[in-house]
Amino acid sequence: MSLLDKWPLALPHIREALAHSGDMHTPADVYQRIEEGRAELHVGNRSAVVTQALSGGKHLHYWLAGGHLDELKKIERDVSADAKARGFEKVTIAGRRGWLRSLENFEEAATIMVRKL
């Protein structure tokens, strides 16, 4: 499935994730990064996830995720297994603290703070 086919399915979930992360990017920013190969889109039936390869391909970062928890957890497991097979050494997720309780084998490494001006 091409990006043009996936994007309309993913867009509502991407907007949701952007809103929860402080609207630091626009959907157009996300689309551009995916189109340029600087991010990768993973779409389920009711969810979407955007990842980015960091540290020269050794670190996969889950940048945005929105949708149904059970499906998001399955996407995470599948994407992480693929990342390991491709030589990635670790994955990170930026998200709300509640995600930490919902995902297996993750530990808190940092806190992102926001102050509206």
Image (cartoon, helix red, strand yellow):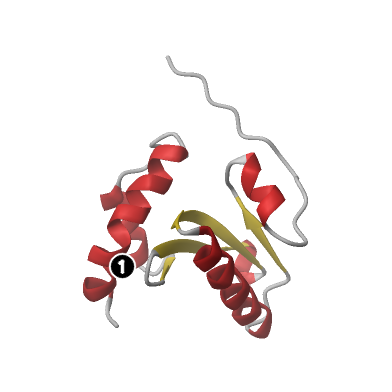
Kind of residue sitting beneath label 1: Glu
Quadrant position of residue 12: bottom left
Residue occupying image coordinates x 74% and y 62%: 104
Q: In which quarter of the image is the N terminus?
A: bottom left
Q: Is mark 1 on a helix, strand or loop?
A: helix
- Residue 99 sits above or below residue 8 on the image: above
Q: Say which residue appears at 59% left-offset and 41% top-offset.
A: 96
Image spot of residue 64 (x, y percent): 47, 53
- Can you say which quadrant of the picture contains the C terminus? top left
Residue displayed at 71% across by 40% down: 110
Of 69 and 80, the residue lying toward us:
69
Residue to which mark 1 is pinned: 35
User: How many residues crowd mark 1 within 10 Å: few (<14), some (14–19), many (20+)?
Assistant: some
Position above or below: 78 against 93 = below
Question: Which residue is at a point 61% across and 34% down the rendered structure image?
Answer: 112
Vertical side of 114 occupied by 47: above or below: below
Residue 58's spot in the image, x, y percent? 67, 69
> Where is residue 30 drawn, in percent x and y?
35, 54
- Report the number of discs: 1
Choose between 15 and 116: the one closer to the eye: 15
Percent across and percent down for residue 27 are 29, 50
Q: Can you say whether 53 is above or below 95 in the image?
A: below
> Where, by quadrant of the figure, is residue 111 drawn?
top right
